[in-house]
Image (tube, rainbow, N blue to C red):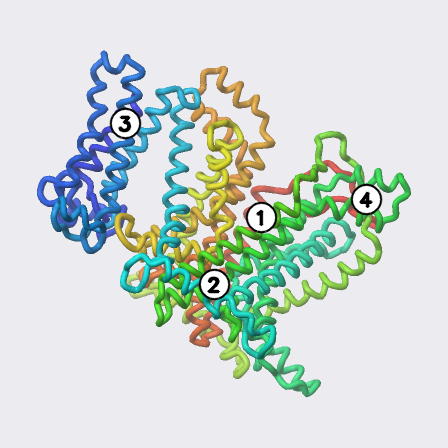
Amino acid sequence: MNKLVVYWILAGSLGFTILPWYLVDDGFFSFYWLLEYDIDYYGSGFLKGLLYNNWLLPIVIPLFLPLILFSSKLRLNPKIYSNIFLFSGLIGFAYFFIQGFSIGIRGWNYEFYENIFGEVGRQYGVGIGAVLTVGTFIFYITHGLSSRGWLNGDNFIVGSIWFIIILVSLFVFFPILTMFNKAFISSDGSYQLLNFSNKFVNKGIWGIDCLYSAYSCGVVWNTIFMGVLTAFSSTFLGLGFALLIVRTNFKFKKLIRLLSILPIITPPFVIGLAIIILFGRSGAVSSFLDWGFNIEPSRWIYGLSGIWFAQTLAFTPISFLVLIGVVESISPSMEEASQTLRASRWKVFTTVTFPLMRPGIANAFLLGFIESLADFGNPLVLGGDYNVLSTEIFFAVVGAQYDESRAAVLAIILLSLVLIAFLLQNQWLGKKSYVSITGKGDSGVNSILPTSVKFLVYFIIIPWSLMTFVIYLMIIFGGFVEMWGVNHSFTLKHYIEAFSVHITETRDILWTGTAWNSFSVTFFVAIFSAPPTAAIGILTAYLLTRHKFKGKNAFEFGTMLSFAIPGTIIGVSYVFAFNTPPIEITGTGIILVISFVFRNMPVGVRAGIAAMNQLDPHLDEASSTLNASSFQTFKNIILPLLKPAIIASLVFSFVRAMTAISAVIFLVSANYDLATSYILGRLENNDYGLAIVYASALIVVMLITIVIMQLLVGKRKLGRRKLSDNQLQGNLGG
């Protein structure tokens, strides 16, 4: 029996017989129980089974059954060997699963169990002992399958696939299914189809009164309309930025590029705050118009127009990052071929260049639509009486009404809108080919933009960039005044209140600023979530690109699903799924880390796939001919070559964790408050100065991170010629 099997049997034994079976108050990874051991609180599954919970004892059988394989006669029979591991794992995992979900906070969840076993007390969430035990059962399953020859008997590959399947099932599909389940539960706890239909068919959701009266339409139509507007505007501006940087000789394109991506490193609702500072009733622009042109300040920024403006500012960088790669990748040879046929610049642009941008435009539009639907901060700050699904879900969960089934119904509708958007995108793109990089000689020069298009790009993008610059200037300026719009005297009190540090006489450092706690929690949560995000993403990419197995398409869909699910739905579903046993982790730091990992994991997957496709499979084959295992090949050959993808995944997950709000707004607690929720709290209290100071600090941290990423990853070079300074530069910024 190999060492790996022995190690897992020992781990399972340790988890079941010694380590705490249930989650302890000290924390999942706490070892405080070693100092003050108490069976009631820290008892292992075996001890609790002997004394109190006899339903835990049957786990002993599948856990220790593989020990009989220490007999050489049984071990040498491949069929018996694989069957023992496979069935031990399946039986143990199934029993663990059934037992875990059969007992809840109030005892048995199902009456027939109570009739068999009698009454029981509440069950707590799984602890480190239970996790190790169920991990051992999963290893038994994968080892049994590999022993049967599945995927050439490779333990690493089989184990990795099952590991990712279990994680995705547990932290993506299970919360979504739990949310669906909540939609059918009435106020008395019973299942009623009528409860779902009554909440689904609701005038407040589907009403169209706005078409023929002064009343507003239902929240669904508000959300769709807002999503379409934002998607159009952000895609249009993103394409304009991409064309200006790649296809023009504008002198300040590096500065424009910096300004274009600046909003992506900013908490979304901070944009809304900056808009209030500029265009609110006491804003700088409103005050100037009132003074210079006698235009009375209004409340136009609160409602549809304000949300649209803020979301366009916030999500244009995403469209730009998608489209700049598409614009750079268009083959110059195709455009040159059109020019040799005496096509005009306009003809080349409309018949060659623009059609090749279709997939990028579709992806940018889709991302803008999804981000708009999932956006929570800007509608909350600027929404006024214009309600959207994300804010309605929030108030259904944390508001005075507290209606879980209503929140679940609204979340289902929001998820359906996103999935429909994906289907429409695929239908629009069809099965046409958009390949423009073939590996053949491609050192031509891209076609110059038509004069009308170039001046249109200049006319729109340059003023938009200037406005972005002014907005961020106001954000910085707002942190140094007493009270924006009332008293503009210079002060540092907001910085002192947020980030003050006191050194005592004994040289102890006291972090007295009110923002330090949330900042440290945010930073460490982001740091701890980034490595597993990159690791799972890169491992998934390796499995998808280098190995063939049944259900591969479903496997890929499952790993990418969380990216399509709006953050609001992720947050709500996590509250529903992980607020009760067997996985009871709400209010902890673990749930924040997990939500970030599986929310951002698809980015690591896509980055890894893109990088893996550039690696010749012969490298893997050469390694295997030298008798290297797949794990050794992955560790020593693949990972070093994927360094840029790993860095990109790490930085992206870190940035998103530092600035996220839609998902984590439901998951933060008093002990684990995040920077974005802290800023939102200050906004709700009209403490704009403190909010601005904190946002500025986050922006600085994000800028440093982006600079480090650029230095480590570098620029892509496609080997295309550059023109002189007086002409178009074919490829810049790549």
Q: Which amino acid does label 1 sit on?
A: Leu
Mark 4 nearby-residue class (10 Å; few <14, some 14–19, many ≥20): few
Query: Rounded to the nearest whole Å, what is the CA distance between mark 4 and mark 2?
Result: 48 Å
Tell me whether the residue at label 4 lies in contact with that at label 3, contact meaning CB atoms closer than 8 angstroms. Answer: no
Kindly indicate the quadrant of the structure image that contains residue 299: bottom right
Q: Which amino acid does label 4 sit on?
A: Leu
Query: Rounded to the nearest whole Å, what is the CA distance between mark 3 and mark 1?
Result: 40 Å
Give coordinates of residue 677: x percent, y percent. 42, 64
- In the rendered image, which residue does mark 3 sit on? 87
- In the rendered image, which residue does mark 2 sit on? 390
Q: Which amino acid does label 3 sit on?
A: Phe
Give coordinates of residue 128: x percent, y percent. 25, 43
Q: What element carries label 3?
A: helix
Tell me whether the residue at label 3 lies in contact with that at label 2, contact meaning CB atoms closer than 8 angstroms. Answer: no
- In the rendered image, which residue does mark 4 sit on? 723
Residue at the image position 37 percent from the left and 70 percent from the top: 399
Mark 2 nearby-residue class (10 Å; few <14, some 14–19, many ≥20): many
Give coordinates of residue 313: x percent, y percent. 61, 63
Q: What element carries label 1?
A: helix
Q: In which quarter of the image is the C terminus?
A: top right
Query: Rounded to the nearest whole Å, what is the CA distance between mark 3 and mark 2?
Result: 45 Å
